[in-house]
Amino acid sequence: MVFVAPVGAQDNTTVVTAVNTTAVPTIPADILANLTNLTNVTTVPTVVSNVTTVAANATGNIKVVPASGSVYVGEAGLNLNTLAGIQNGDTLGWYQSGSNIQTNSPDDTFVISDALNVYIAPGTKTGVWYNLKTNTPAITVKDPSLAMKIFDVKTGKDVTNKQVVEGALLNFRIDSNLDAFTQRGVTGAPVTIKVKDPSGNVYVALYNDLKQANGLVNIPVSSSSFFVKGTGTSGAMWDTNYQDYKNGDYKIWVESNVNGMKDNYKDPASGADNTGKTISSVYTLTIGQDALAITSNADATAGVIRNNDFAISISGRPNQAYNLWVSGTSSMTGAAGDMPPAIKSGQNGVAAGAATTGSYVYNNAGATVASDVAAGVNPDTGLSAYYANVTTDDNGKRTVGFSTNASTKDQTYTIKVQWTDSNGEFKSDSVKVKVSKGEVTITSSGNQSYFLGESITLSGKNTDSSNVFLFITGPNTPVNGANLNDIQAVVNGQAGSFTQETVNTDDTWSYKWETSNLNIDAGSYTIYAVGVPADKDHLKDAKYATASVIIKKPFVTANASAATVAKGDKLVITGLAEGKPSSVAYWIVGKNLFAYNTETVNDDGTYEISIDRGTTQNLASGQYFAVIQHPMSNGIFDVAPFKNGSVTRVYDTSGNFFIAEGAGRLQGSDAANALVNLLNGANIDDKYTKLSFVIDEPSITINAIPDKNVGDKFEVSGTTNLAVGDTVLIDVLSSSFQPTDKTQAGDFSGVSGSTTIVKGDNGNTWNFTVDASAFKADQYSVKVESIEASTSQTSTFNLLESGAVGNVTAQPTAAVTTVKTNATGSSTSAATSAATSAGNNTTASTAPTQSPGFGALVALIGLGAVAFLVARRN
């Protein structure tokens, strides 16, 4: 890299002068002395005799760099020869950190062409550069840095980018690395502070509180951080109360163009001044009036709905302590319903209940703040929540939060802020805030009619308080209301005696009321939702709403699928258990049977108890009793069995019992009556319903079938005690169906099928359609069989040649009833079949026979042949 001298940079000495964009004549000293009397000065004079120049002192020159001295990127016209000893043609080298300059080659170099006129161009690497001829440090290149701060000399606080009030006294602090210029034997690198007012005027001098001008041009940087002090009080350079400094925003910065540095060193991307290097950032200072003001964020008309927060904002002097209070509330007690808005504790800059404010005298009559506010203290701090000492921030601002709740009285309040200035004058402001009551609503889920034991959801909105207080009135409850959970009387003003629910942030609330175990009667009730813990007699000043509900006692119903149940059939008991219990208990009591179990209740209150076929198959024939037990609102079965070894006792909650299993047990109706007597006990709230049913041997009957002709289509039917929906199998077979010799042709006709039992007018029935169009004339057997109940029945009828029926006088086959098939498949018949001989008018009767097997079918064939012959004979 080669350092070159900019065009025109030839002098070895420089005098830096103030630069003016507008020509301003030099002001004589005698006029300067009278500047305090001027009233129409719009800009401060830019030429002030004692600060307009920074000249080289007797021992140094701002361009002459000592041996291994510091130089800055952007400097031009530097003399590296006189003191640094660098000659034209010397090469300077730069090494990476950690390099050995004795053995390593430099990482960058440049040749000095004119040691009296050197330019440190942008991009030159910072750090030590060595003279490669002597391997000794020649110069140190630095990147310039420049920043500043604005300070209030009275408070010592940094007010950069902040607001000050009229009368604030200010000076500046400069932070820079340009202090290395002192190596050159000069006072320091010259920098200039620029102050631009709201109208765009740029000042190069400012007046202090002594009406003395303090120059801002060519201020020497003698150290890395220093205050530029003026000649005013405490070193003030700037009195913001001076007549020329109007209120508003001022732009302030510092810059340096020493040795052309600012002109030469620009931002590589934008080409603008290099902020933070040769020019600082532009800072803001706002000058405001020395006024005290207070505003509120509450709506001017609607105000604040109580139970909501609001805030007031104070604007005044920076870092000034002010007295804030809720004025004119001394007549309020501070008790529930008679409280002002409270200042929230724990806020930054807000000392609620501060003694200095409590004792502050706010008028000429000697009244104190403490005497102007309501009684009562914040229970968390033990201090008043109705006044505070408030200190503004650096910008003279402070926001103070207030809270309201259901105990805040609805009215308009005056919030006041005040202080006494150094002249003993009161400065104050106030704002009015209206606090209004909110609204409370309540609704109940469902149709407002409920059974004890159900969960009832109560919900609504509450904009009046952070909690909703609930109580109930109705039959046999305390006249002023009762707690929803224990029906105990509520006490006015005592929150703990009410049922409470917290209000959500969106002002909604919801409470799930469990009515189990409540000792209340059936009837109509009113539920109150109140914004404060007020009973029925004290609702005048409270916000509340009501909801009506009807409470009913739960009950249980039951229905059996059949009054008589055939062994092997399923029994289903269905019903409704109102009140939404989780389950019901059921008891089945009969001969040699005692059974207890529970069944889950569906969401709609229905239940279904199923006693399977395997169970009824093994029950003895006879009467049985079923009791369905509802646990009622407490959800507990107050009568229940307890088994101890082989003995089962059924107890109630009072200790009464009977033995259901084991020695001394009760059976059948005795056990059922004993169970009902326990459930009817005075201390038992359980409800029950009962029913009975009969277990019987399965039976099927076949109605008599008269003679039919080939080609007829007719019904075979009968009755049964099997359950509706059961399936029976039907076989209609020709009597010719018998074993034959393997060489003979078989001669058979018939039909098989199934049918479903249905409910008839006088019991359960079945029927089956027979199509005899493809049958041959013969005697036929009909077999009806239930697989599940293991029972069957048979009967016969004659099928004659087409047209034969009506020419023969014959008695139809009688109906036959079967009780139950035994293990061998035979059946004991209680009915008879008869046939009348048409030829001799004699009546023949047949003795009970077994259900037809192969042998019986042979006999039936013979009987059928006789009938056929008789028909032919006629």
Image: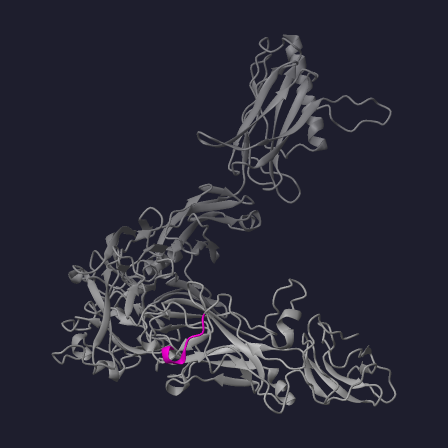
User: Observer-nearest residue: 755 or 342?
Assistant: 342
Task: Tell me where residue 567 sits by quadrant.
Answer: top right
Can residue 479 be seen from the camera position used here? no
Residue drawn at (55%, 51%), measured in percent from left and top? 615
Tell me if residue 549 comes above or below residue 127 in the rendering: above
User: As drawn, is 683 to the left or to the right of 566?
Assistant: left
Q: Position of residue 692 (x, y in %)?
A: 41, 47
Q: Write down the quadrant of residue 88 in the picture.
A: bottom right
How many marks on residues? 0
Colouring scheme, one of rainbow, by chain, secondary structure, one colour: one colour
| Quadrant containing the N terminus in the rendered view | bottom right
* Picture residue at 25% right of the left edge, 84% below the top: 355
Q: Position of residue 511 (x, y in %)?
A: 35, 59
Say left or right for 616 vs 730.
left
From the viewer's side, name the closer residue of 636 and 256. Answer: 256
Image spot of residue 438 (x, y percent): 26, 57
Seen in the picture, residue 34 relative to 578 is either above or below; the reply is below
The foreground one among 320 and 373 is 320
Queried whether the magenta region covers residue 828, the answer comes back as no
Q: Nearer the viewer, residue 406 or 456?
A: 406
Q: Is residue 610 visible?
A: yes
In the current view of this chain or complex, which residue is farthest to the left? Answer: 365
The magenta-colored residue range is: 25-31
Figure quadrant of the C terminus:
top right
Instruction: Please say whether residue 28 is one of the residues in the magenta stretch.
Output: yes
Left or right for 105, reference 261: right
For this orientation, the residue located farthest to the bottom is 59
Percent of width and height locating residue 84: 74, 88
